[in-house]
Structure formats: C-alpha cells, structure tokens
Image (spheres, helix red, strand yellow):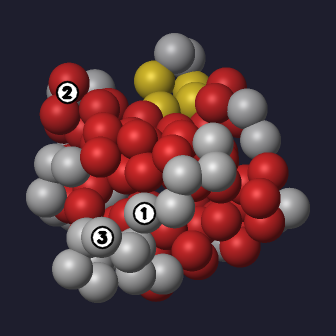
Amino acid sequence: MGLAQYADNGLFAPRKIAEAFRTTSEEVARTAGLGRDAIQRKDRVKSDRTQRRLREMIEIVNKVEVRFGSALIAYAWYRSEPLPGFSGQTAMQLVQSGRADEVLEYIDAVDAGIHA
C-alpha cells in the first residue's frame, strides 16, 4: 500500500492506519511509541514527533509488505518478530526507542543479501 493511503490532508492519520491494519488508533500509537494523547488531540497529531513516528512505522511496514504479500502480515512482523543482531528486539521496539533508521538499514541489508 502506498504512503498516501495512510494520510489525510497531507498528514499521516492514525485512524486510516488503524483501519488498514484492522486495529485501533490507540494500538497504532502504542506500536509507534506514542502516547494516546498524541493521536487524540489534533495539535498533537500534527506535531513533528507524532508524524515522524507514524511515518517511520509505515515506511518499515511498507518496505517488508512486498516480502509478506500483505500489509497485515507485515504489521504483525513489525510488532512481533525479533530481529537478529538487535538483542531480540522487534522492529516495533526499535522504533519506540528512536532506532527506526537502524531497522530500515537492516531491511535493506537483508534485501541486498547481507545476513545480519
């Protein structure tokens, strides 16, 4: 799914993301490392931090969706599959701790045939 599918008026919309992943907006916030307040208050949804975390999560899920053939399965991978070389942490845990770039680099390395 393209990034635009998750956006409303140029901003990532937690509600649209939740619909695509068949979950709640609160769960989307949690998996992106955000508090519930970040997705309930309009000013917070628009904040750079909230938009960055939502974008990072969507970029990772989109990148692995091709591998799994489904956004739902890619989202499940994001939330639950421990990544080699990251002390058993999942992509979600790494994003929550501000390490999304490392996850994207890991995915690129695996796609290039370099095993972590």
Q: Is residue 88 left or right of residue 91?
A: left
Image quarter of residue 29:
bottom left
Q: Please, what secondary structure does the residue beneath circle 1 have?
A: loop
Q: Measuring 46% from the left and 83% from the top, which residue is drawn there?
A: 80
Upstream in the sequence, badge 3 or badge 2? Answer: 2
Q: Which mark is residue 47?
A: 2
Upstream in the sequence, badge 1 or badge 2? Answer: 2
Q: How many numbered discs sit on the rendered protein?
A: 3
Type of amino acid at the residue the image marks with label 3: Gly
Image quarter of residue 52:
top left
Q: Position of residue 11 (x, y in %)?
A: 45, 24
Q: Is residue 51 left or right of residue 62?
A: left
Q: Please, what secondary structure does the residue beneath circle 2 have?
A: loop
Image quarter in which the N terminus is found: top right
Q: Measuring 77% from the left and 59% from the top, which residue is drawn there?
A: 67
- Location of mark 3 (residue): 85
Type of amino acid at the residue the image marks with label 2: Ser
Q: Are marks 3 and 1 in contact (CB under 8 Å)?
A: yes
Label 1 environment density (alpha carbons within 10 Å; few <14, some 14–19, many ≥20):
few
